[in-house]
Amino acid sequence: MQYLDLKMDFMFKQLFGHPSRKSITMAFLNALLRRTGDDRIVDVQFENTELTKETEDGKTGRLDVIVRTNRGERIHVEIQIIPQYGMPERLLYYWARLFSSSLSKGERYDTLSPTIMIAILNYPLFPHETDRFHTIFHLREDEEQFLWSSHLEFHVLDLSQFMVKWKKYRREIKQSPEWPWLTMLSAVDSRSKKVDEEMVRELEGVAMTEQEILEALEEWQNLSVDPENRYAYEMRLKWLLDQLSNIRGSREEGWKEGREQGIKEAVRKMSEKGMSVAEIANILDMKEAEVRERLKD
């Protein structure tokens, strides 16, 4: 079996953003939104099915998934493996644009469509606030907790935390409806080019009783072995890895600059207190020439 990493936005859009795979998309959304019974999504219309062909620099068209459900809701699903600055505000901005765009000139505000944002990340968005892998947000009154409006709903799914929970509390994890789909997204790591065989076996076991999981696995494999699709995937992966390398390089450079500024400040303050170059060099474990150089700046 060959599987490409579904955390790659290109592959994610291929599997979950194509009208021919509508049944997979609906099952995926019902699991993530925990919809059951009469509340289930039974039909979707895709609002952005375009997928611009990959170029050598890895640029593509829109790789998120936007659908309108039979219940009149609009759902925007985005997957990110590279940490983005200001992600909470970015998601709020995208929600606002999508929410307001459903109102045509002259229409009443109460005809606006309920709008749901789903962010699937491979890093924690709120690392100090929670260790849960699925967090859900609404706009509520502070004391009595009643909703301002049911038209706003945010879901954040942290795949990195899902992996932690999967390894430690597998039996508990399997009680959540979204676990097979998050397992599917987590089973392959594009950077290490490794497949978690145990996760794949778990999925194959579920596929024996759940038609949508079986269908998703089959489509996933077909997409993974298609030569043209693999080429586009590799181009996108190269671009994303370059982006990640640039981010790391910028952070390292920023750390070096901050450290240098700290040393200069320490040298300056010690000198202002009347300490000699030799004394400063001894305290900071530096050469006297290095201290004199920093005193020039």
Image (cartoon, rainbow, N blue to C red):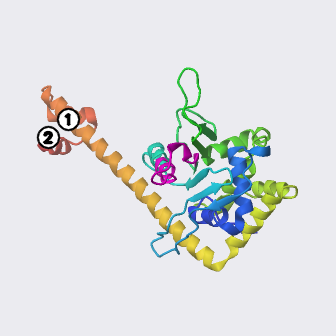
Estimate how packed mark 1 is, as few (under 14), some (14 to 19) or many (20 or more) residues with alpha carbons within 10 Å. Answer: many
Assess whether mark 1 and mark 2 are in contact (beta carbons under 8 angstroms).
yes
- Most foreground residue, 66 or 63: 66
| Residue 284 x %, y % | 27, 35
Say if residue 36 shows up in the picture.
no
Element assignment for label 2: helix
Please identify the quadrant where the N terminus is shown. bottom right
Label 2 sits on residue: 295
Question: Which quarter of the figure has residue 22?
Answer: bottom right
Please identify the quadrant where the C terminus is shown. top left
| Residue 257 x %, y % | 29, 47
Pick whichever of labels 2 and 1 is earlier in the sequence: 1
Question: CA separation, marks 2 and 1?
Answer: 7 Å
Query: Is 233 placed above or below 104 here?
Result: below
Q: Amino acid at mark 1?
A: Val
Residue appearing at x 48%, y 70% in the figure: 58
Estimate how packed mark 2 is, as few (under 14), some (14 to 19) or many (20 or more) residues with alpha carbons within 10 Å. Answer: some
| Side (left or right) of 31 relative to 108 | right
